[in-house]
Image (cartoon, helix red, strand yellow):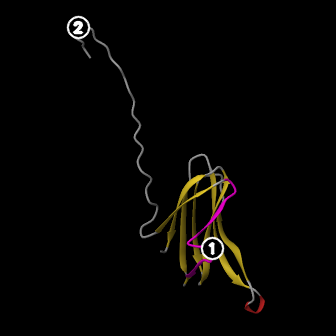
């Protein structure tokens, strides 16, 4: 830069450009939510979804610096069909803010559970199939 009295100077600036996070799957359903530490959310609902069998995939993206876990649960009926309970069939519980599950599932009723182990904030969950 040169000013009106022939003085010159330079200045250096750096710019960081961060790409938007890529959607980890094609044709998946996207859910968004926010949790406080210790909080739990279920997708698509706490009552679950019916699945005819095949591969279930889930991808959780949570804020940097947090530890959110992803669990796939299957519903089972009690003795003589009385009562129901949920059992974890696949768990991604590493010390990371991003967790993925791919599970070969029999037909049944399933639900995805997102839990904030450490930290809090908004997250995005992608589930397949729709």
Q: Residues within 10 Å of mark 1 (few under 14, many from 20)?
A: few
Whole-percent x and y of residue 13? 38, 26
Q: Is residue 45 above or below residue 10?
A: below
Identified at 21% across, 10% down, the residue is: 4
Screen quadrant of the N terminus: top left
Q: Is residue 17 above or below residue 55?
A: above
Whole-percent x and y of residue 8? 28, 11
Identified at 31% across, 13% down, the residue is: 9
**Secondary structure type for disc 2:** loop
Whole-percent x and y of residue 46? 63, 73
Q: Tell me, for residue 46, which label it has, or none.
A: 1
Q: Tell me how many marks there are.
A: 2
**Secondary structure type for disc 1:** loop
- Region rendered in magenta: 37-50
Q: Which residue is mark 2?
A: 6
Query: Which is more toward the observer, 46 or 49?
Result: 46
Identified at 65% across, 54% down, the residue is: 36
Residue 75 in magenta?
A: no
Q: Tell me, for residue 12, which label it has, or none.
A: none
Considering only order in the chain, which callout, 1 or 2, is on the residue closer to the N terminus?
2
Query: Which is more toward the observer, 121 or 12?
Result: 121
């Amino acid at each position: 830069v040169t000013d009106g009295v022939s003085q010159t100077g330079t200045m250096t600036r750096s710019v960081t450009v961060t790409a938007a996070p890529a959607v980890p799957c094609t044709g998946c359903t996207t859910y968004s939510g926010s949790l406080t530490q210790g909080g739990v959310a279920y997708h698509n609902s706490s009552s679950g979804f019916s699945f005819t069998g095949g591969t279930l995939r889930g991808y959780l993206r949570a804020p940097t610096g947090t530890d959110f876990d992803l669990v796939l649960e299957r519903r089972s009926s009690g003795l003589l069909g009385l009562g129901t309970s949920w059992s974890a069939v696949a768990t991604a519980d590493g010390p990371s803010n991003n967790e993925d599950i791919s599970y070969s599932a029999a037909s049944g009723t399933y639900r995805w559970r997102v839990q904030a182990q450490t930290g809090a904030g908004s997250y995005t969950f992608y589930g397949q199939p729709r």
